[in-house]
Image: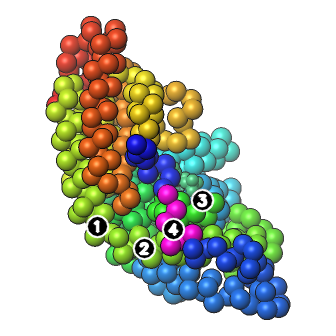
Amino acid sequence: MRVYLDNNATTIVDPHVKAEMDPFFVEKYGNPNSLHAFAGETHGPLKTAMEKIYAGIHAPKEDSVVITSCATESNNWVLKSVYFEYILTGRKNHIIVSEVEHPSVIATAKFIESQGCRVTYLPINSEGMIDPQSVRDNITNKTALVSVMWVNNETGAIFPVQEIGAICEEHKVLFHTDAVQAIGKIPVDVQSFNVDYLTFSAHKFHGPKGVGGLYMKKGKELMPLLHGGAQMGGLRSGTLNVAGIIGMGKAMEQAVDALDYEMTEIREMRDQFEDQLLEIKDTFVITPRAKRTPNTILISFRGIEGEAMLWDLNQAGIAASTGSACASEDLESNPVMEAIGADADLAHTAIRFSLSRYTTQDEMDYTIDIVRKAVERLRAISSSYAYAPAGHKSGLAAH
Ligand code: PLP
């Protein structure tokens, strides 16, 4: 059996999404900016796709949703434009990000820090959550931007973006949220709270890879990161990824339609699987379920290296993860476990299971069986498990 439980890394492209994209490779391949019929036949489908994307995040017509190549580009764009417009010009000198942002935010923040910007990295608490008060405490009259993700990709923790947005509005500070892991898992409505910029990426909600977006509130348009042919109203140049945009539109529409299923059936499947995992001795989950997206579990098995567990799972056809996809090759400990101050042993034992609307009960039943066998096998040969009593050093409660 092959079981895919790494949906926070990427998702299967929904066949309906692929079907909508297919004609735009060989039959209808015109450049939308050209002045002939080949171009013309892309215009209607592109407009429909954009309408679906606007509707998916409840963006009003007057705001901008700009298509990018990925969430990494969107995140880079926000921080670098703020750097050019506010920091380099001397108007402001400070930004705030959480310390568990995706590397596309953290690495960009470190880059602009190296160029002279002051950066505050907000800590998370022992549940992997951000306290909005820490945003208020760190804002100064020189703060240009706060960037805090909506949902953490490792734990699924839902951060209090509504409260953070309100604090930013009160202090007239720009607010950006990386909503990559929120779309299709919780309701996303940019009109329901104060947010200036919002990042998303199609391949996380059953759309194609290589296409994402950045929402910008009217009057808060960023300076372009890519200059050139003036596509996307001059905000983001480059020939449009026609098939990608059409695919993302369909994927967004379906993500919204499937939200109820995700929040009931998938949540139930996840909860039941998590209960079974927690019946295994010396297992730890840091973020309470009620504060998480319905599809994610980050769990530690004391005494078992995450990579060893992944190996056993992979041998049995099961895909999971030990950290964000980009970090998995480095054999580094899980960044969130490190951020909460878990001891090194425990930080190396975290495994992330992330479900999707394609996950089935049969797959979960198969997986729990394999996990139990893997735990037994790996603990039997683990020197650290043999010598570390339950609860030792971690400060975390054992389940
Ligand atoms: N932000 C978050 C929270 C993510 O989980 C990811 C992907 O893992 C990204 C950004 C980057 O997305 P993309 O692959 O579209 O660049």
Question: Of helix, strand and loop, which one carries label 3?
Answer: loop
User: Mark 4 Cα within 10 Å, few/some/many (few <14, many 20+)?
Assistant: few
Q: Where is residue 275 in the image (x, y as percent from the top left)?
A: 18, 41
- Which residue occupies the foreground of this view, 374 or 189? 374
Give the distance between the C-alpha atoms of the residues marked 3 and 4, in whole angstroms: 14 Å
Three-letter amino acid code at the position of disc 3: Lys
Residue 29: percent from left, percent from top: 76, 77
Query: What residue does disc 3 label?
Result: 209
The numbered disc on residue 85 is none
> Quick check: 217 left or right of 162?
right
Q: Where is residue 141 in the image (x, y as percent from the top left)?
A: 48, 58
Q: Quote the CA–CA distance across marks 2 and 4.
A: 11 Å
Start-end of magenta stretch: 12-18
Mark 1 sits near ligand 1, with its Cβ under 8 Å away = no
CA gap between label 1 and label 3 equals 24 Å
Q: Residue at x 32, y 54 (%)?
A: 360
The answer to whether residue 59 is magenta is: no
Left or right, residue 134 beside residue 334: left
Marks 1 and 4, the one that precedes in the sequence: 4
Q: Position of residue 298 (x, y in %)?
A: 33, 40
How many residues crowd around disc 1 within 10 Å: few (fewer than 14), some, or many (20 or more)?
some
* Residue visible at 56% across and 81% down in the picture: 50
Badge 2: few (under 14), some or many (20 or more) residues near its Cα, within 10 Å?
many
- Asked if residue 28 can be seen in this view, the reply is yes
Assess disc 3: are there few (<14), some (14-19) or many (≥20) residues with their C-alpha within 10 Å of its C-alpha: some
Q: Mark 3 and mark 2: span between their CA atoms? A: 16 Å
Question: Could you give the CA–CA distance between mark 2 and mark 1, rounded to whole angstroms?
Answer: 11 Å
Which residue type carries mark 4? Pro
